[in-house]
Amino acid sequence: MVSPNVSLRIYLILLVCVAVLLPVSLFAQISSKGRAKSVVNHSIYHGGVAGGDDFEMLSDASLPVDLVSFAAEATTTDRVTVSWETEYEADLYGFSVEYSPDGVEYQQVAWQAPAAKDGRGHYVQELPRPAGTVAYYRLRVEEADGTSWNSDLSHLRFTTDGWSVSPAVNPVVGNRATFKVAGVTAGESLAVRVVDLNGRVVHHGICPDTGRSEHLRLSLELNPATYVVTFRRDDGRHQSHKLVVR
């Protein structure tokens, strides 16, 4: 038979153990719940075979816009129509239509705020036809966080308005390039500028009395690469051509 003193001691020991272990167990449960909540809040994937809503995954990792198409078209003799379509827009600031006469240096010519309906956007911008015979258009997509990216280029070639200066041979081997001249008034001078694909001017000057001959020969000290050559008349009309030097 166990004495009352021994029973009392055993009871006190058990009471102390419960008092010590119970707060530890409760703290562990609370900490475990806190960690689980943190993991869920930072998880990208919330659906699929694990259950849940797949849309939550899209809202965390989707792109700001899905650009379906982009095109520029000379619709009349004095107008250019730029159009594009999107299928999904979110966190988007807007669209900037940019134009370049040579495919190197671009400037904004139109701005469009997001206006998608039922998840799909269709946009059209009517622009005046630029001077010259060649035009490059692109779409700069600007996101709400300040980042941006460009679409593919849309390249247009217009009629020459009765005059042209174009490479007679392309690619060019060596330091001399020959251009065919047509429709330029005899005695008229042409300004010429050559830039590389980084936009750096590598040659510029004046070609006097261009219209007196059917050919224009230029001495160019250029490294093997691709360049853009632009000829400009006194009235501002100009033509640009890509020239490959080997």
Image: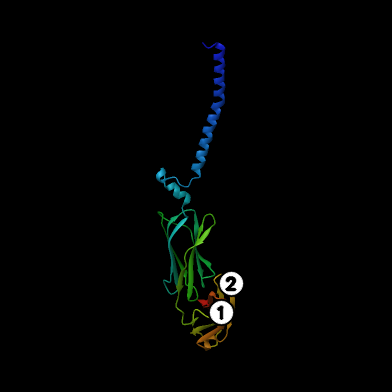
Residue bearing the label numbered 1: 192
Residue type at the position of mark 1: Val
The residue singled out by tag 2 in the image is 200
> In terms of image quadrants, where is residue 206?
bottom right
Q: Nearest the camera: 3 or 28?
A: 3
On residue 136, the disc is none
Q: Position of residue 202 (x, y in %)?
A: 59, 75
Q: What is the crowding at mark 1: few (fewer than 14 residues within 10 Å), some, or many (at least 20)?
A: some
SS at badge 1: strand
Query: Disc 2 and disc 1: Cα gap in Å?
Result: 14 Å
Question: Residue 209, image x and y in percent?
Answer: 56, 87
Q: Residue at x 54, y 74 (%)?
A: 225
Q: Earlier in the sequence, mark 2 or mark 1?
A: 1
What amino acid is at disc 2? Arg
Which type of secondary structure does the marked residue at label 2 adopt? loop
**Relative to 53, is 111 on the left or the right?**
right
Instruction: List x then y, in percent, for residue 77.
Output: 43, 75
